[in-house]
Amino acid sequence: MDHPIEDRRSTRGGERGRRRYPRVVIGFEGFYESRRRMLMPRGGNLTLRGAFLRTAAPDPKGTEAMFRLQLPDNVTLLRIPARVVWSNEVAGEGPVGMGLRFERLESFQIKRLAAALLQRAGLWMFAGPVQPGRAREVSA
């Protein structure tokens, strides 16, 4: 069984809480470009409002970038302005990479992201939080 939704919760304002949008582990190809670097990530996780990119050399928090994203079963790229909202270079202190927040998304981009996430994870991805030891399962 495949489990596409990550159950980690965000920490906002010092309080541990439920993420606003579920993260879905999904295969994608993309191109990340900032003033400091260019990366070609393959896979990771996505939400309707952001992404996690694994990289050994992440940009610092606050960096503005352009993220070009190719979703599965789609030949065109989404061109999405993004900002680095967290960054980690140290193995053992969480995942190594950076978290992006998508900015100024067009309605067609949100629809394409939502369709890909729903196709991968199903409608139940918007249900309440998963209880410990009770992971939801998805058939591939």
Image (cartoon, grey):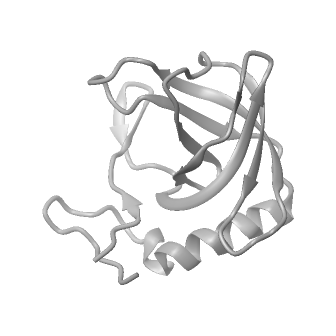
Q: Nearer the viewer, residue 132 or 38?
A: 38
Foreground: 124 or 109?
109
The residue at the point 52 percent across, 31 percent down is 55
**Observer able to see residue 136:** yes
Q: Is residue 126 left or right of residue 14?
A: right
Residue depicted at x 73% and y 52%: 69
- Which image quarter is the C terminus in? bottom left
Locate residue 3 relative to residue 33 in the image: left or right. left
Q: Position of residue 32 (x, y in %)?
A: 72, 36
Across and down, in percent, residue 21 comes to: 53, 55
The quadrant in which the N terminus is found is bottom left
User: 120 or 50: nearer the eye?
Assistant: 120
> Residue placed farthest to the left in the image?
133
Horizontal side of 35 relative to 128 (left or right) equals right
Q: Position of residue 34 (x, y in %)?
A: 77, 24
Instruction: Tell me what residue is drawn at x 30 percent, y 23 percent.
Output: 93
The answer to whether one can see residue 48 in this image is no
Asked if residue 55 lies left or right of residue 105, the reply is left
Identify which residue is drawn at 35% across, 79% down.
138
Which quarter of the figure has residue 103? top right
Looking at the picture, how far across and down is residue 25, in whole percent? Answer: 46, 59
Q: In the picture shown, does residue 64 fall above or below 53?
A: above
Q: How many marks?
A: 0
